[in-house]
Amino acid sequence: MSETGQELYSLLIPLAEMRLLVPRACVAEVVGFSVPEGNGSDRAWYLGNTRWDGRLVPTVSFEGCCGDQVPEAGRRSRVVIFHATGSALPGRFFGIVSQGFPQLVRVNPGVLRKEPDEKKNANLPILCQLRMVNEYPLVPDLEKLEAMIVDAGGS
């Protein structure tokens, strides 16, 4: 937050057909994409584990978690490594595949407006959708996403 408490440094994370908006503090690092190892799950959105900082980090497709098709990774794809917000993930980190490099933005009440929750569904890891100037990013429910990863066999 800024000195006034009215701004929050955030990241706009590009996905195939949407963007996620998350506080910068939730993200540990953004790394180049490499094919995740050892899926071990029957869920298509759980891609396996990415090697990062000497550990294996469970990695997912957010689009797949929302019931959409898992996009193929391209040369611009990255893995956004998140700090776990809860205690469900033993490794305390997880990754989401992005379709490009996240953009740092400063968010304040003057540029945000809550939109009708078209994608809101109790089974999806989405808190809400916002309007931010000409963007309509989704705010992910990171705790729900972590629980989904644990349920899929990620650790």
Image (tube, rainbow, N blue to C red):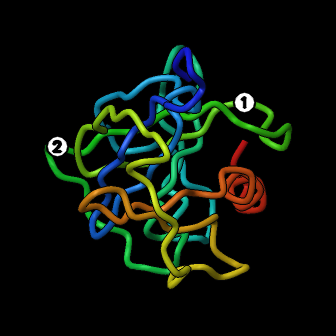
The tag earlier along the polypeptide, 2 or 1, is 2
Mark 2 neighbour class, 10 Å CA radius: few under 14, some 14 to 19, many 20 or more: few
In the rendered image, is residue 56 in sight?
A: no
Q: Quadrant of residue 34?
A: top left
Res 25 quadrant in image: top right
- What's the mark number on residue 92? 1
- Dividing the image into 4 quarters, which one contains the C terminus? top right
User: How many labels sit on residues?
Assistant: 2
Q: Is 133 placed above or below 94 here? A: below
Please state which amino acid type lies under the numbered disc 2.
Answer: Arg
Q: Pick whichever, 27 or 111, lies toward us.
A: 111
- Residue 151 x %, y %: 78, 61
Residue in the image at 24% along x and 62% along y: 134
Q: Pick the residue in front: 109 or 88.
A: 109
Residue bearing mark 2: 76
Identify the residue at horizontal 63%, vertical 63% (top origin).
Answer: 41
Look at the numbered disc 1 and give the secondary structure of its residue. loop
The residue depicted at 27 percent of the width and 65 percent of the height is 16
Q: List x then y, in percent, for residue 103.
A: 28, 37
For residue 147, what is the image quadrant? Answer: bottom right
| Amino acid type shown at disc 1 | Arg
Q: Residue furthest right?
A: 87
Residue 47's x, y, as percent? 48, 55
Which of 34/132 is in front? 132
Q: Which mark is residue 61?
A: none
Q: Please state the horizontal and vertical placement of residue 26, each as a whole percent of the image.
A: 58, 32
Of helix, strand and loop, which one carries label 2? loop
From what the image shows, is residue 126 above or below residue 149? below
